[in-house]
Image (spheres, rainbow, N blue to C red):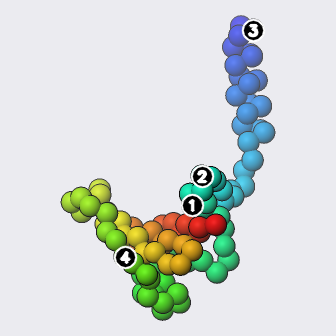
Amino acid sequence: MILKKLIISSVLSVAVLTPLSSSADILNLGQKPTVLMKSNAPKAGMSMQSVLAKFGEPISRSIAPGKVTKRNPKITTWRYAGSAVIFENDHVIHTVIYR
């Protein structure tokens, strides 16, 4: 009974102390790219056409290898000076800013 109360109180305390708001992830990989929020970077959900119109032609474009299926969508990366934009099908899913 004591163990049961201890487990319940532990679970409740974790649930209460866990923040409910979401925030951006910051991933520092040393000399490699860092994921940051940047106000003038392409936002998740933007179309390829919108990114092209707003940021211009990328330095390079690459498509991930593999068969494209409903469960395995086309992943495309556009590289700009100082950043990379990753698309799933035709919409932005991530923007990586190099520091």
Seen as rendered, the residue at the extreme top is 1
**Quick one: label 1, few (<14), some, or many (20+) residues within 10 Å?**
some
- Residue type at numbered disc 3: Ile
Please give the residue where the numbered disc 2 appears in the rendered image.
29
Residue 63 is situated, as x and y percent measured from the top left of the image, at 31, 69
Please give the residue where the numbered disc 4 appears in the rendered image.
61
| Residue 33 disc label | 1
Q: Secondary structure at mark 1?
A: loop
Disc 3 vs disc 4: Cβ atoms closer than 8 Å?
A: no
- Residue type at numbered disc 1: Pro
Kindly identify the residue that appears in the image at 29 percent across and 56 percent down: 71
- Residue type at numbered disc 2: Leu
Please identify, in this view, whether the residue under mark 2 or under mark 3 is nearer the observer.
2
Cα gap from disc 1 to disc 3, whole angstroms: 48 Å
Please identify, in this view, whether the residue under mark 3 or under mark 4 is nearer the observer.
4
Of pointers 1 and 4, the one earlier in the residue sequence: 1
Residue 60 is situated, as x and y percent measured from the top left of the image, at 39, 78
Of pointers 3 and 4, the one earlier in the residue sequence: 3
Occupied quadrant, residue 70: bottom left
Of pointers 1 and 3, the one earlier in the residue sequence: 3
